[in-house]
Amino acid sequence: MRSVHYAKQREMLKIIGKDISYVVSDEDIRRELGISLFGEKTQEDTELPKIKKACEKCQHPELVYTTRQTRSADEGQTTYYTCPNCGHRFTEG
């Protein structure tokens, strides 16, 4: 029993005073949480919903949009619009 205690003590002495670090990148966090950056090209880009609303920049009559909950749950969602014609982006909400 005494030798087991001594062995554990020796192992602890090897790591005392050593720095233990782990590097986590923002990409690792996004991947783990399933978050994509706004504007990142994804497979969903070809299947985004469309709305009959004129573009503020080129007046194209149809926009694609996504919504995200960017504030607390008791407040409304933010809608992100993108013009398929000129690529202009703007938000509402």
Image (cartoon, rainbow, N blue to C red):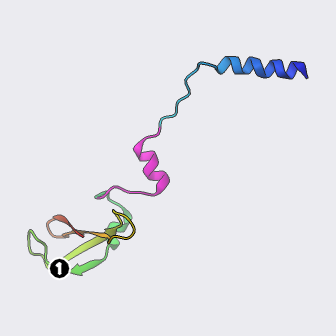
Q: Which picture quadrant has residue 76?
A: bottom left
Other-residue count near label 1 (Cα within 10 Å), few / some / many at <14 / 14–19 / ≥20 = some
At 13% from the left and 77% from the top, the residue drawn is 54
| Image location (x, y in percent) of residue 63 | 21, 75
At 16% from the left and 64% from the top, the residue drawn is 88
Q: Is residue 63 above or below residue 13?
A: below
Report helix, strand or loop for mark 1.
Answer: loop
Picture quarter with the N terminus:
top right
At 27% from the left and 72% from the top, the residue drawn is 65
Q: Which picture quadrant has residue 25?
A: top left
Q: Which picture quadrant has residue 8?
A: top right
**Farthest residue toward the left?**
58
| Image location (x, y in percent) of residue 72 | 37, 64
At 43% from the left and 51% from the top, the residue drawn is 30
Query: Which amino acid, by three-letter code, is at mark 1?
Result: Lys
Depth order, front residue of 49/10: 10
**Farthest residue toward the right?**
1
| Image location (x, y in percent) of residue 18 | 58, 20
Relative side of 16 to 41, left or right = right
What is the span of residues highlighted in magenta in the rendered image?
Answer: 24-38
Q: Is residue 65 above or below residue 7?
A: below
Relative side of 15 to 37, left or right = right
| Image location (x, y in percent) of residue 7 | 80, 19
**Farthest residue toward the front?**
74
Q: Is residue 25 magenta?
A: yes
Residue assigned mark 1: 53
Picture quarter with the C terminus:
bottom left
Q: Does the magenta stretch include residue 28?
A: yes
Relative side of 3 to 77, left or right = right
